[in-house]
Amino acid sequence: MKTSSMKRRAILALMILMSAGIMSADDYRVNYEASAIGTAGSGDFAPYFLSAMSHGKIVSAGNAWVEGKAWRTMSADERFSYGFGIDLMAGYASSVDYARYNKTDGQWFIHPLHPSRGHIQQLYGEVKYRGVFLTVGMKERGSALLNTRLSSGDLIESGNARPIPQARVGFIDFQDIPFTRGWVQIQGELSYGKMTDSDWWENHFNRFNYHYTTGEWYHYKRCYFRTKPSERFSATVGMQASAHFGGTTYNYFDGENVEIVHNRVNVKAFWDVFIPKEGNGEAYYLGNHVGSWDVMLRYRMRNNDEIKGYMTSPWEDGSGIGKLNGFDGVWGVEYRRASKGIVNAVLVEYLDFTNQSGPIHYDPDDVSGGTITDRGSGADNYYNNAFYNSYANYGMSIGTPALMAPVYNRDGYLAYTCNRMRGFHAAIEGSVTHDLDYRAKVSYRKAWGEGFILLPEPVHSTSVMVEADYRIPSVKGLSVKGSLALDRGDMPGNAFGALVTVSYNGSIKF
């Protein structure tokens, strides 16, 4: 009896020791962060660089927000892992006056609009097994290829707009392709989601000319190939593709709602937007498709500093996929030091969206008895579409913020009116001390109108921003960030503004 009791105690002690060892080796942590965000400035909207790449948090000139978030990150070292996150925002944002047409009396009037006083910014859960993940919900994402902190923005998913509720599956990172001995890797993702911004389009539309769509669905996919990253030279090449589909479109002409179209959204529609086939939807293809060819070349020096050269080229149909859109795209060079110092990274980009596969679009099938049999596939009109909303979420560009998004059109014409554009962009970041970082950006953009409609005169904008981020040494987790930004030009107008963010972060260990 005594021996049996000792055995039980020994087994219990062993179990306690094993549990302690497991807990010490694999602590369960939940991260948290609380922030107070304030902006002030001239003009109706925040300066370009205060709003760009902020996940849609800052739009108007005046803001006073509090934000609280908690999240658990999936472990890269474990075969199976899971994570989750919640991010809530509440506060104040100044109003902007938008024009609207009143059909009853035939007059235009001005109505002020502002972002919601509170919203869920992120809410998601995710799991991974080996190298494959599944995420369900709204999660902030940046560019899959470019430096989100310094770049002018990815053409397809840049981190400029609020996240879209979706289910996304893919590889957690680049995975070795079998039989290549690690010399070729693959990374890809696929998602379907539901847009939640129907009220925004309905409230901001001028109800005179053009159209808006409610209840749209969202689809995204990409596939990248990369050569062995441990080598000094490595190359990444691939394609991104995205689409809006489904929903109900309201077409207006001279103040009259002339047509209501219920776009197809069934099981077959989800397949047809995944692999578009000619003749399966509105004007040849189902959905509003946008995409890009992406190429990046990276060289690592002997001191582990890296230099990257990249090109991302937009497309909206077969002509762009076939690279018939000339020099259009973002062409960039980035230099990054391996060790921190006064200069950590420098980036320079040239932007060109003036070709758009040429100005002529012609299909012989549309002309009865015509003698011209050649097909001209041009006039892409980047981010705009005749059947769906422009490529934006709550008015902010899902792709690059360099193309002026619909939210900035105070006349209520909800399209990209300045997408035929050229520009230059440069950025630098570094560390003054261990606790003080800085970042600076400058850009110049000039636009001639959109794909089909030119402006009477070109418009331009010069934007500058300087930012400092100070981590207070005496209080771990407390930081203060301040930014000053200036816009000069008419995209959408002159503006000066300042942003201050006070944040406290930490983690709870279980």
Image (tube, rainbow, N blue to C red):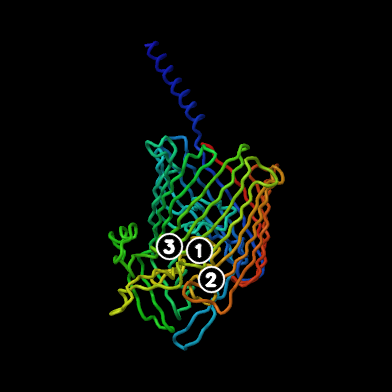
Q: CA distance from mark 3 to mark 2?
A: 19 Å
User: Residue 353: x and y, percent?
Assistant: 52, 65
User: Residue 473: x and y, percent?
Assistant: 70, 42
User: Residue 335: x and y, percent?
Assistant: 61, 48
Query: Hey, which quadrant is residue 508 in on the image?
Result: top right
Query: Hey, which quadrant is residue 281 in on the image?
Result: bottom left
Q: Is residue 59 above or below residue 28?
A: below
In the rendered structure, which amino acid carries the disc numbered 2? Answer: Cys
| Local secondary structure at mark 3 | helix
**Is residue 181 in view from this perspective?**
yes
Q: CA distance from mark 1 to mark 2?
A: 13 Å
| Local secondary structure at mark 2 | loop
Q: Are marks 3 and 1 in contact (CB under 8 Å)?
A: no
Q: Residues within 10 Å of mark 1 (few under 14, many from 20)?
A: many
Identify the residue under disc 2: 418
Identify the residue under disc 3: 320
Observer-nearest of 251 and 274: 274
Taking the image as shown, residue 36 lies to the left or right of residue 284, namely right
Q: Which mark is residue 397?
A: 1
Q: Earlier in the sequence, mark 1 or mark 2?
A: 1
Check the picture and name the quadrant holding the N terminus.
Answer: top left
Q: Residues within 10 Å of mark 2 (few under 14, many from 20)?
A: many
| Local secondary structure at mark 1 | strand
User: Residue 342: x and y, percent?
Assistant: 70, 46
In the rendered structure, which amino acid carries the disc numbered 1? Answer: Ser
Q: Is residue 176 above or below residue 501?
A: above
Q: Which mark is residue 328?
A: none
In the rendered structure, which amino acid carries the disc numbered 3? Answer: Gly
Q: CA distance from mark 3 to mark 1?
A: 20 Å
**Is residue 199 in view from this perspective?**
no
Q: Earlier in the sequence, mark 3 or mark 2?
A: 3
